[in-house]
Image (cartoon, helix red, strand yellow):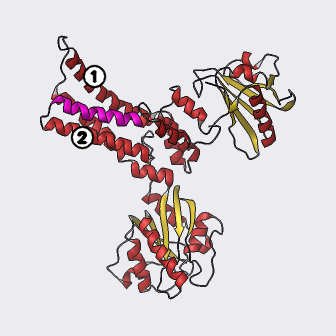
């Protein structure tokens, strides 16, 4: 492959900038842009050891002093000869070094091209490649740990175990059919049944992690609902850590939805603060109230905010009923600094649904600790089981197809169908698993995955 180069640390000024190079012949190319202080050429330096020297521009002039390291293939990230330069993170310096590499014969790397080469050279499978971008995009420590484990092959090993069992079944069947005169032990139905059930169990365990994987990667869609002036916008600001929404004493200030992503109790919440829910004749506010109801329908979690300093109303009760339709909801008694206590709301209507948690806070004072603990309890981080959590729709869809094919094979076996019928479904499962790891993935699938990457990775 040709030599590619890119800035790996973005366009903003940083303390340290990194330029990456990869491809056959890249070491001699790097000799033209880096002058080691020890007098030896870059291509003669020890592998995987930092060397100090001067970075040169297209005219051979020193533009910075820093470190460089070479990684001979196949024991490199991309699986081919590659190098990295570490210099001061001035965009000008990085750009001049990159232009010098282009002048020496490299070309600009495309988005994700380094990782794509690692995939094509067998250094990563598709699940590990996807883990790279998940690790870059991780917004919580749990998401980072899960992605790091997947980058080291946790999902690949699970899928490979299922693949090996299915290959054992299919290969032995073909061996018996193709070589009838050979003394090959025929695979027994009970052995096939046991193998298929084990494969089904493994895939089911992985598919059961999808909802948790979605929380890890995308956060929890959370709607903040309540009457006007209950303190919804103050709560949003307290969780965001800055004045994200306008807060006034005038009811109905929030007429459109305000969205923000925040970290609450170690859990990423995608907050939606819509208009306060109440009966109104104002046309614009009516639209805002309707959006509040729509936000609740899409939410995974509802924060039902009630003014704890005022007597509860039937409107409060109706809001709690709406919130209870979400998969999970928390009753948030705000303004505890004025009048703590939440029992009154339930005395208003004993038949009100009970929340998953009830907390008292003072959003205006930033006292939301009890809410953070409640969210942490409802969405516990727990231990990441060796990174075996499916985190995207592609993995879920392919794993589901593989499991359904395995279950059809089991049903065919139970119904006494001929082995070739079982074999057809087993091979379909193998194709789906191949899409997961990249063994049989179509080019458009591979292209779509690597289009998510930034340049330089």
On screen, residue 40 above or below 228: above
Q: Is 45 rendered above or below residue 230?
A: above
Quarter of the C terminus within the rendering: top right
Figure quadrant of the N terminus: top right
Seen from this angle, which residue lies furthest bottom? 281
Question: Residue 381's x, y, as percent?
Answer: 46, 51
Q: Is residue 57 above or below residue 319?
A: above
**Which numbered disc, 2 or 1, marks the residue that appears first in the sequence?**
1
Q: Residue at x 69, y 31 (%)?
A: 107
Q: Residue at x 36, y 45 (%)?
A: 207
Residue 424, horizontal then vertical, whole percent: 25, 32
Instruction: Look at the numbered disc 1 and give the secondary structure of its residue.
Output: helix
Secondary structure of residue under mark 2? helix
Q: Eyeballing the image, is 98 above or below 362?
A: above
Q: Residues within 10 Å of mark 2 (few under 14, many from 20)?
A: many
Q: Position of residue 175 (x, y in %)?
A: 24, 18
The residue singled out by tag 2 in the image is 407
Span highlighted in magenta in the image: 417-435
Task: Name the mark on residue 367.
Answer: none
Residue found 56% across the figure and 71% down from its top: 235
Main secondary structure of the magenta stretch? helix
Report which residue position mark 1 lands on. Answer: 171
Residue 394, image x, y percentages: 43, 44
The answer to whether the residues at label 2 and label 1 have Cβ atoms under 8 Å apart is: no
Residue lying farthest left? Answer: 416
């Amino acid at each position: 492959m040709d030599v590619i180069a890119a800035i790996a640390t973005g366009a903003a000024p940083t303390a340290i900038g990194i330029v990456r190079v990869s491809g056959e012949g890249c070491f001699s190319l790097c000799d033209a842009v880096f002058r080691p202080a020890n007098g030896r050429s870059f291509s003669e330096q020890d592998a995987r050891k930092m060397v100090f020297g001067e970075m040169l521009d297209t005219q051979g002039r020193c533009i910075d002093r820093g470190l460089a390291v070479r990684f001979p293939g196949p024991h490199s990230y991309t699986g081919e000869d590659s190098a990295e330069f570490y210099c001061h993170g001035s965009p000008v310096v990085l750009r001049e070094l990159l232009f010098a590499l282009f002048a020496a014969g490299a070309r600009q790397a495309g988005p994700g091209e380094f990782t794509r080469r690692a995939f094509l050279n067998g250094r990563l499978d598709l699940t590990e490649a996807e883990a790279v971008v998940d690790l870059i995009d991780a917004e919580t420590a749990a998401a980072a740990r899960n992605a790091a484990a997947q980058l080291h092959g946790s999902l690949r090993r699970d899928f490979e175990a299922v693949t090996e069992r299915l290959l054992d079944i299919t290969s032995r069947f073909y061996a018996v059919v193709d070589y009838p005169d050979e003394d090959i032990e025929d695979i027994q139905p009970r052995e096939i049944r046991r193998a298929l059930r084990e494969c089904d169990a493994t895939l089911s365990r992985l598919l059961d992690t999808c909802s948790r994987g979605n929380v890890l990667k995308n956060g929890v869609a959370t709607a903040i609902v309540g009457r006007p002036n209950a303190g919804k916008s103050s709560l949003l600001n307290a969780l965001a850590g800055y004045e994200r929404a306008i807060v006034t004493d005038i009811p109905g200030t929030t007429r459109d939805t305000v969205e923000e992503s925040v970290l609450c109790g170690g859990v990423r919440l995608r907050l939606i603060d819509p208009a306060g829910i109440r009966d109104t004749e104002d046309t614009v506010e009516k639209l805002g109230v309707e959006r509040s109801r729509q936000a609740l329908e899409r939410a995974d979690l509802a924060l039902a905010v009630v003014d704890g300093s005022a007597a509860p109303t039937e409107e409060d009760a109706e809001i709690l009923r709406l919130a209870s339709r979400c998969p999970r909801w928390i009753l948030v008694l705000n303004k505890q600094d004025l009048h703590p206590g939440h029992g009154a709301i339930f005395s208003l209507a004993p038949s009100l649904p009970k929340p998953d948690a009830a907390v008292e806070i003072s959003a205006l004072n930033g006292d939301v600790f009890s809410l953070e603990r409640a969210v942490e309890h409802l969405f516990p981080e727990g231990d990441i089981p060796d990174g075996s959590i499916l985190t995207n729709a592609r993995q879920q869809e392919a794993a589901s197809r593989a499991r359904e094919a395995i279950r059809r094979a089991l049903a065919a076996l139970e119904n006494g169908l001929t082995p070739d019928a079982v074999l057809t479904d087993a091979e379909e499962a193998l194709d789906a698993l191949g899409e997961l790891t990249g063994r049989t993935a179509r080019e458009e699938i591979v292209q779509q995955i690597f289009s998510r990457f930034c340049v330089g990775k």
